[in-house]
Amino acid sequence: MAAAARVQCHNNTSLTGSPLPRRRRNSPTLHFSPNRVNFTPLKWIGDGSSSCTRMVSGPSLKGGTTTVRAALEEEKKTDAVSEVVEEEKRFTCVMKFGGSSVATAERMREVADLVLTFPEESPVIVLSAMGKTTNNLLLAGEKAVSCGVSNASEIEETVKELEIDPSVVSSFLEELEQLLKGIAMMKELTLRTRDYLVSFGECLSTRIFAAYLNKIGVKARQYDAFEIGFITTDDFTNGDILEATYPAVAKRLYDDWMDDPAVPVVTGFLGKGWKTCAVTTLGRGGSDLTATTIGKALGLQEIQVWKDVDGVLTCDPTIYKRATPVPFLTFDEAAELAYFGAQVLHPQSMRPAREGGIPVRVKNSYNPKAPGTIITKTRDMTKTVLTSIVLKRNVTMLDIASTRMLGQVGFLAKVFSIFEDLEISVDVVATSEELDHVVEELEKIAVVNLAKGRAIISLIGNVQHSSLILERAFHVLWTKGINVQMISQGASKVNISLIVNDAEAEGCVEALHKSFFESGDLSELLIQPRLGNGSPVRAMQVEN
Ligand SMILES: Nc1ncnc2c1ncn2[C@@H]1O[C@H](COP(=O)(O)OP(=O)(O)O)[C@@H](O)[C@H]1O
Ligand SMILES: N[C@@H](CC(=O)OP(=O)(O)O)C(=O)O
């Protein structure tokens, strides 16, 4: 559950909160080639002069026996080769595939084909758990029964279909069974055990995929993120990546590559708690964050996140199916979108990309020809009014009115300290139990009204045009007879949030989408701001 708070001080000012931490490089260099490209053996092309160092075939994607190292051994005396070493040491991009992209054996094959369509790249692959594995593992854990058995049979089936050696996963499946038995015996599932339990999902998917790549002749190496330097806080189920991660991960991946080049296949979502040394997870959907962290650590040219949709869309397609792809986004817009609930990206995933200045491309593994969305630091916003509509459901709104025991400044400070003490962000409260604590504390200094069953509709876009956005949005909602209960403009200036009744929210999103994205080009309205009487400003000036 999420919460929004409206704080009323005794002078009747009201304050709404919308926090977000904020913060690069050049445009992307990858171009999608729709047709599968056959591997060419490792060779250097050019005009034959000694300065030629261009590599045609990403050595990591190359099957066969000629390794980069062997090629280098042969040629290492030339000046050209020392440049090659530098060049070849560099991975070019990270490609992250989510659960929906690798849900079955068939999908694993298709994803492998997709990776091979980029022979000029040296990618690092990040994988999530297959399909709904994470949910199934959680279910199995929560029921503390061997629900893992049906899960395991699916995994065994995938291994069989891909004709991989079953020993790749057998010891893991046994360990998983033991773990579930242990949970059943203890009748307890701590957050730490939950993280260890769900880690089997990514540990298995990456082992299967790496084994498959090796089977088809593409040398690959599997990595568990928690073994290669992904260090996090010890906040189980919601670990935060620590700075030490970047150099550690870069060193490990580059060192291994220089020793014995192979495509790295890294578990998404997982880390290692810096104090406990136990497996942690980065929050649901955390593989996006794994990918951007690797992107920053290795200073890559591009981070690709492959999903089951044609990029970031104008709204969640499961809410309104006429959602369309947004071709360009800034890191701020994408972060805001994710923070306010768009499932398509992990809320923290933009941070490393922004810090490293690395473009993020969101692509559809089911429709690779679609251009997708490219996320960069800046973009031309002159014609942008609205970018996307995000719906966060099941929100509880807290109305907090001062009982005049404290001055205005003291009151606000106290209100925020209560949230801080309970480690609850104003926008997001995880459980109703937490909310009860907040209310209990707030009632010592205020009259608190708790309104459940609300939803936050966030309008992500160019808040330079906030009057136009608001005018349209309120007109649409007024026409539908919807009462907006709270409004907040984010500090990031890319978001306006409206609170409405949850039951009406989907209808609101649909109506707003029709008005903003399906009824002509709104940017035309930006050319001449209008005065109250509808006259364009410039016309007035001419008359004067
Ligand atoms: N604005 C949006 N644009 C695209 N997808 C969205 C948006 N909001 C929600 N979604 C949902 O996010 C899903 C993709 O995210 P996710 O399931 O996490 O992908 P993956 O598991 O492949 O990483 C889509 O199937 C879609 O239902
Ligand atoms: N498997 C994890 C991590 C993840 O990122 O998954 P996905 O990429 O499928 O959203 C989850 O379900 O949360």
Image (cartoon, rainbow, N blue to C red):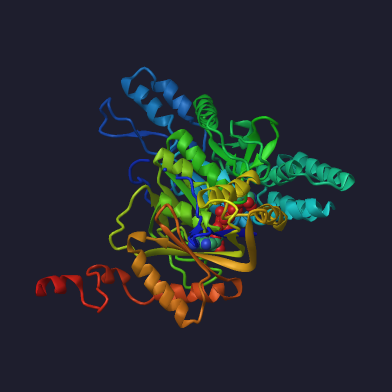
Quarter of the figure that contains the C terminus = bottom left
Q: On the rendering, which quadrant does ligand 1 occupy?
A: bottom right
Along the horizontal axis of the image, is 301 left or right of 2? left
Quick one: 437 or 241, which is closer to the camera? 437
Quick one: 81 or 316, which is closer to the camera? 316
Q: Is residue 520 above or below residue 110?
A: below
Q: Residue at 79% across / 40% down in the picture?
A: 175
x and y percentages locating residue 367 in the rendered image: 48, 61
In this view, which residue lies farthest toward the right? 185
x and y percentages locating residue 284 in the rendered image: 62, 51
In this view, which residue lies farthest toward the top? 77
Regarding residue 544, the answer to whether it shows in the image is yes
Q: Is residue 108 above or below residue 460?
A: above
Q: Which quadrant of the figure has residue 278?
A: top right
Q: Residue at 61% across / 44% down in the picture?
A: 282
Quick one: 81 or 290, which is closer to the camera? 290
Q: Residue at 57% across / 40% down in the picture?
A: 265
Regarding residue 101, the answer to whether it shows in the image is no
Q: Residue at 51% across / 55% down in the picture?
A: 17
x and y percentages locating residue 193 in the rendered image: 76, 42
Quarter of the figure that contains the N terminus = bottom right
Quick one: 417 or 301, which is closer to the camera? 417
Along the horizontal axis of the image, is 276 left or right of 94? right
The total number of labels drawn is 0
x and y percentages locating residue 169 in the rendered image: 72, 42
